[in-house]
Image (cartoon, coloured by chain):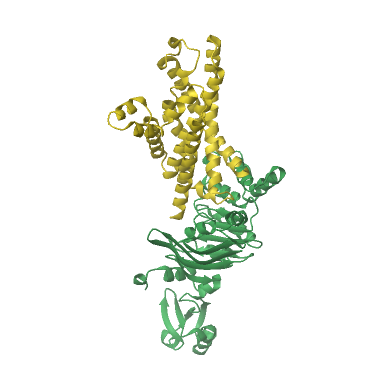
Chain colours: A yellow, B green
Amino acid sequence: MRPILTIARRELGAYFASPVAYVFLVIFLLLAGFFTFTAGSFFERGEAGLAAFFGWHPWLYLVLVPAVGMRLWSEERRAGTIELLLTMPVTAWQAIVGKFLASWLFLALALALTFPVVITVNVLGEPDNGAILAGYLGSLLLAGGYLAVSCMTSAMTRNQVVSFILSVVLCLFLILAGFTPVTDLMVRWASPALVDTVAAFSVITHFDGFQKGVIDSRDLLFFLSVIGFALFATGVIIRGHRAG
Amino acid sequence: MIRIENLVKTFGAKRAVDGVSFAVQRGEVLGFLGPNGAGKSTTMRVLTGFYPPSSGRVSVGGHDVVEEPLQAKRLLGYLPENAPSYPDMSVQGFLEFAAAMRGLDGAARRSAVGRVVERCFLGSVLRQSIDTLSKGYKHRTCLAQALIHDPEVLVLDEPTDGLDPNQKHEVRNLIRELGRTKAVVFSTHILEEVDAACSRAIIIDRGRIVANGTPQELRAMSEVAGAVTLRADGASEEKLAALGRVQRLEGGIRVYPADQGAAATLAARVVELAGREGWRLELLRTEEGQLDEVFRRITLPDTVKP
């Protein structure tokens, strides 16, 4: 456990050592605000809820989370520090989890900084704050799922840009599998069972419940298994490089 | 402390290390020589647990690096090739991170950082970010990281690469000093370092060990080892030819001993001959052999051999 925390602390420090962290936070908050109030027509809806806010998260994270995760392993490989890190008394598994947790915590911080939107909706009306909390939990898990995928793609290459693009493409698949325009298209030729199976792999399907304030154990399990699988794959990829 | 038996490491079809065996005891400094791409770094990466071996056994302090990697890694300090470090950290932050990874806390961490900072002369750049440092300082920062937990086994991949002559000298002294109480392996392709720091040297070529011995033993493998070079007024090559093969050099004559047995007395017999013939000796030297000549001879492919 200790090495995990030490690695996580270093990694988190690395975000704030460069302006990248602050640039990211500002862009994230600006975009979140823009999508909620302008594109999501928060005021016109006349609802005391944050559907306009959470509904955009799968798309917002699609670009922003890979930007946070792309350097995790590719940078270690490019700079050669992976050799330093993995010859210290840690297992590859501890290093993977430590790095993932640091980035996840960073994303959690970004998400926590959206608190003014919760205050706004509470001032304007009487929302179900439990549902909002569930929405935040879902959003955090969604970010974690994307992040684990980025972690995996960043282990595949020394190049951060390649890592970013791969990650965006994979996350886009996770969205599109359950995106209504796509499922509508599939219904025309595929059996409903197949459409449902494909949609079950989508983050949209599983994120929906959280937005409505429902914490379903299947949705929880989905996000946790995406994270678990992607991190496991990261471990396999890293071992693959070393085995030659 | 270090034991490597029949180590083989393949990458696809390429055998980077092909049946290497050696052992290093405490109090020994082993120099690892070889041309680029000979398998030096690969051997070190297997030794430090970064690459798993394709076959063979590697153990550090009795712990197999595959079966008990954490125990083996705890005993090791490692300076990887090109001395990587996290550029966005300060020297102090980086060393504290390394100390924390080695399980050092509080006062023990502070004293460990203080000790390596002093040892590697990093005091003046402690708060500077690593990416603003010169190559020499970066290198020493990474070396400091390897020493932070006062390891029993040190593995240094080209520890003097990119340093200026003064820094090279300091690092060699440091290696020699550390070698008194630890087992040290370091790779280099600077041959004078073998004399300056090693108690034993291994020459590796295309994944195989081609020579293993003390620096003196390696030098003795040289063609010129044991030959006598002289410069004398009136010296005649024909007369000297009676003692062995004669070669004319610029400003001197070199006599090669006929066989190993003749080498020991060659110089005495040259002096005797000079006395008899009345030559006036200006210079007389028994050649010890040159490492670079040995190195070139045994690491070149057969077609290039003279």
Give the answer, above or below, for where B224 lies relative to B135: below
Q: B305 left or right of A91? A: left
- Quarter of the figure with the N terminus of chain B: bottom right
Residue B277 seen anywhere in this rendered image of the structure: yes
User: Residue B26's image quarter?
Assistant: bottom right
- Quarter of the figure with the C terminus of chain B: bottom left
Residue at the far right in the pictured view: B107
Q: Which of B76 and A3 lies nearest the eye of the viewer?
A: A3
How many labels were placed on the picture?
0
Give the answer, above or below, for where B249 lies relative to B185: below
Q: Which of A132 and B5 lies nearest the eye of the viewer?
A: A132
Residue A19 seen anywhere in this rendered image of the structure: no
Residue at the far left in the pictured view: A189
Residue A244 locus on image (x, y percent): 43, 55
Residue A84 locus on image (x, y percent): 54, 49
Give the answer, above or below, for where A120 lies relative to B255: above
Q: B85 left or right of B116? A: left
Residue B226 locus on image (x, y percent): 50, 79
Residue B126 locus on image (x, y percent): 61, 41
Q: Name the residue at 56% across, 20% down.
A: A130
User: Residue B171's image quarter?
Assistant: bottom right
Q: Which of A150 and B143 lies nearest the eye of the viewer?
A: A150
Q: Name the residue at 65% across, 51% down.
A: B149
Q: Which of A211 and B280 lies nearest the eye of the viewer?
A: A211
